Image (cartoon, rainbow, N blue to C red):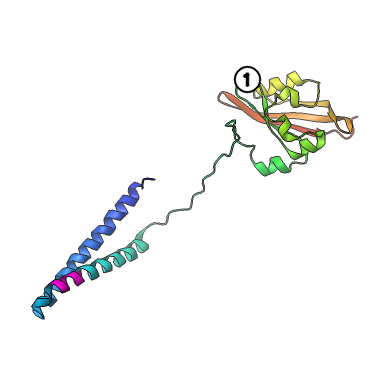
């Protein structure tokens, strides 16, 4: 992975500090060697370069630590989407933990398709969620009433609310069925929500 421009500038700055400090250290070592033991000039200059460079690096770290602005932590959110390229229903916990049956649907131009069914849907209608994934919405509604109206509403990114008789393992039950659809460019995503009708007047 290539570094950012800020990383390059920081590295150049660090090297300049080390180089400048090494020159100063080398000069100091040369001066000491010349004044005291001329034969030790090479050793003193080498030691001075090394010591000066190390001190320059340490000094630079202290300067950067005091003056550099703190970079705020960032959070990257990735869509885990299925192999269809459709993102998972969001927020996932609200979808998964909803006590009422919910279908997550997507229409990319060929009609609404079920992309996920929550656990309450599986339990209520006695089906495996994977069995309805990628099925046409009309085939997964668990009713024969007003299926075309519901499909049309999702396709057009509109909402609809109706009471339908749906088939469950315990027999036919009445549900208030609502669609929540959002049109996004060339596709529409949304939900079909079922709420049990306890008492009809």
Q: Position of residue 105 (x, y in %)?
A: 67, 29
On whether residue 43 falls in the magenta region, the answer is yes
Determine if residue 194 is in view. yes
**In which quadrant of the rendered view does residue 138 lie?**
top right
The image shows residue 74, relative to residue 136, as above or below, that is below
Q: To which residue does mark 1 refer?
A: 110
Q: Position of residue 201 (x, y in %)?
A: 91, 29
**In which quadrant of the rendered view does residue 154 lie?**
top right
Question: Along the line of sight, which residue is nearer the eye, 115 or 148?
Answer: 115
Number of numbered discs overlaid on the protein picture? 1
Q: Is residue 94 left or right of residue 169?
A: left
On whether residue 131 falls in the magenta region, the answer is no
Residue drawn at (27%, 69%) of the image:
55
Determine if residue 28 is in view. no
Q: Is residue 161 left or right of residue 190?
A: right
Question: Along the line of sight, which residue is nearer the eye, 42 or 124?
Answer: 42
Which image quarter is the N terminus in?
Answer: top left
Q: Position of residue 60 (x, y in %)?
A: 30, 63
Residue drawn at (64%, 37%) of the image:
89
Q: Position of residue 59 (x, y in %)?
A: 29, 67
Q: In the structure shown, which secondary structural element does the residue marked by tag 1 occupy?
A: loop
The image shows residue 143, relative to residue 81, as above or below, that is above
Predominant secondary structure, magenta span: helix
Q: Give the magenta range.
A: 42-48
The image shows residue 14, relative to residue 158, as above or below, that is below
Residue drawn at (69%, 42%) of the image:
94
Crowdedness near tag 1: few (<14), some (14–19) or many (≥20) residues, C-alpha within 10 Å: few
């Amino acid at each position: 992975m290539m570094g950012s421009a800020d990383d390059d500038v920081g590295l150049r700055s660090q090297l300049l500090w080390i180089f400048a400090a090494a020159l100063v250290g080398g000069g100091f070592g040369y001066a000491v060697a010349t004044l005291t033991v001329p034969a030790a000039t090479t050793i003193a200059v080498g030691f001075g370069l090394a010591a000066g460079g190390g001190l320059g690096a340490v000094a630079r770290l202290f300067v950067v630590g005091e003056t550099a602005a703190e970079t705020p932590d960032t959070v990257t959110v990735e869509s885990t989407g299925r192999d269809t390229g459709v993102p998972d229903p969001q927020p996932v916990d609200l979808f998964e933990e909803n006590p009422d049956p919910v279908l997550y649907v997507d229409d990319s131009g060929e009609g609404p398709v079920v992309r996920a069914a929550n656990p309450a849907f599986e339990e209520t209608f006695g089906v495996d969620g994977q069995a309805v994934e990628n099925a046409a919405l009309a085939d997964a509604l668990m009713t024969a009433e007003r299926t075309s109206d519901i499909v049309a509403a999702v396709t057009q990114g509109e909402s609809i609310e109706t009471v339908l008789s749906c088939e469950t393992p315990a027999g036919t039950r009445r549900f208030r069925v609502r669609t929540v659809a959002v049109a996004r460019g060339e596709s529409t995503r949304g939900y079909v929500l079922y709420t049990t009708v306890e008492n009809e007047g």
